[in-house]
Image: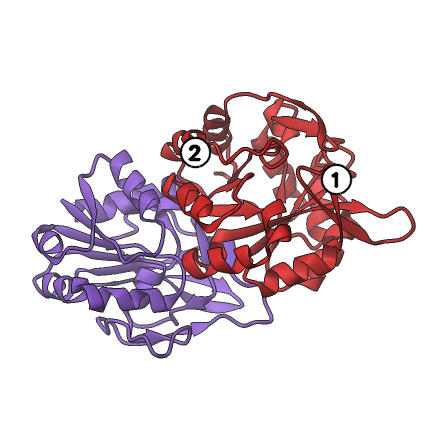
Amino acid sequence: MKGVQFNNLRDAGDPAELARAHSESGADEIVLLDISATRERRTTLLETVRRTARQLFIPFTVGGGVKTLDDAAAVFSAGADKISVNSAALADPDLITAIAERFGSQAVVVAVDAKRCATNSTWQAFTHGGRKETGRDAVQWAQEAEKRGAGEILLTSMDRDGTASGFDCELTRTVSDAVGIPVIASGGAGRAEDFVEVFRQGHADAALAASIFHYGLRALGDLKQALGNAGVPVRWPC
Amino acid sequence: MIAIVDYGAGNLVSVKKALDWLGQESVITSDHDVIGKSHKIVLPGVGHFSSTGALSRSGAQQAIETKVRGGTPFLGICVGMQWMFDGSEEAPDTAGSGMLQGKCLRLPSTLKLPHVGWNHLRIRDTSRLFRGVPQSSLVYFTHSYFVPVVESTDACCDYGHSFSAAVEKDNLFGVQFHPEKSGDVGLKLLANFCEL
């Protein structure tokens, strides 16, 4: 499933098949997000996780609908390596600590969906797949998530999501410089130059893209070659 | 049969999946009799070093040590490799097995921690574990503590400074990275271990 600025969701195909295809074409990591799980009050699609994990030998993160430590435990036993939490963590930040204490910080990714405020360079964190304002400053929330035990931040620019107009480098740099854990930039990937920029100017530790790969707009191999040529260290050949 | 030792932490499922993929019979267990009957032992682990304390409480540690003395190949992964040493700064009150000498230290906090992602290996030519794995191969790491470079170091990696990415001594093998998450390179390494 994939949308534009968190709306107009459309089906991009079977997650297990897509994950395997992406892995074979050189993805370094797979993230499976059930983006409308919280909004539609659904728990994680465990069977999909299980099927996807079976044929995947690269890191596998699952997010969407994880509300309790038990939910997390079920997703880990289905084969996920990391859990991504957003809405539930904002509602109950102790959840981050609980998962980190049981499964380790490296297993907890806190997803921050950030939307730029109109007036200045600040961003607000949203939940429920971008539907609900939290009133929380996205940068401060990322810092709190780190303190509570998050191992990585998956930072999505809601303004850029699905637009292919480039990552929000200012947002990414502000968050990445404010925390001591790796930040994965997401939202807006379109061209190879966007990735170069988000690593260089955005200080991103990793970058995530969905649409451009799902719809075959850009072969992962070509992208990695372009990044390698630009001097960005990449896993190539895969 | 390969015993994948369960101590209530770490993602055992992904290691089991990789061994299944390679056609190797394995069982997830903490039972010392099952460990005693195995012909190879894998100790996976992600998470906190203190979780390895369960190994001595369950009797698994004694079973592992007996088998290792008898020459059974042993592979420790991530925290499982760290446990092969004397201990870790992460949990000073939890002793390692001391099968290898040395102590795990924390990576410099001037860097982003945990060290997450793919990184290059410098592999020792004589390694049995990395037979057929190209020099400078990339593997997947996720850790904040490391084993320094020691005599048994089989491969090094750099993050801030050099650390042991893998160790090898007689029938003892350990990897700081996750072979079950390192694509074809990782599967090759696991296949090498299975063929020992």
Q: Earlier in the sequence, mark 2 or mark 1?
A: 2
Disc 1 element:
loop
Q: Colour of chain A?
A: red
| Quadrant location, the N terminus of chain B | top left
Say whether marks 2 and 1 touch (CB < 8 Å).
no
Residue identified by numbered label 1:
A158
The image's mark for residue A46 is 2
Residue B194 image position (x, y, % from top left): 20, 45
Residue drawn at x 51%, y 55% as measured from the top left: B116
Chain under disc 1: A
Label 1 CA crowd tier, 10 Å (few <14, some 14–19, many 20+): many
User: Residue B175 occupies which quadrant of the picture?
Assistant: bottom left
Q: Amino acid at mark 2?
A: Leu
Same chain for the residues at labels 2 and 1, yes or no? yes
Please tell me which residue lies in front, B146 or B120.
Answer: B146
Residue drawn at x 75%, y 54% as measured from the top left: A136
Q: Amino acid at mark 1?
A: Met
Q: Is residue B76 above or below residue B152?
A: above
- Image chain in purple: B
Q: Is residue A118 above or below residue A6?
A: below
Label 2 CA crowd tier, 10 Å (few <14, some 14–19, many 20+): some
Disc 2 element:
helix
Residue B154 visible in the picture: no
Chain under disc 2: A
**Residue at the bottom extreme of this rendering:** B93
Residue A108 image position (x, y, % from top left): 51, 53
Please tell me which residue lies in front, B16 or A48.
Answer: A48
Q: Is residue B129 above or below residue B57?
A: above
Please tell me which residue lies in front, A107 or A136.
Answer: A136
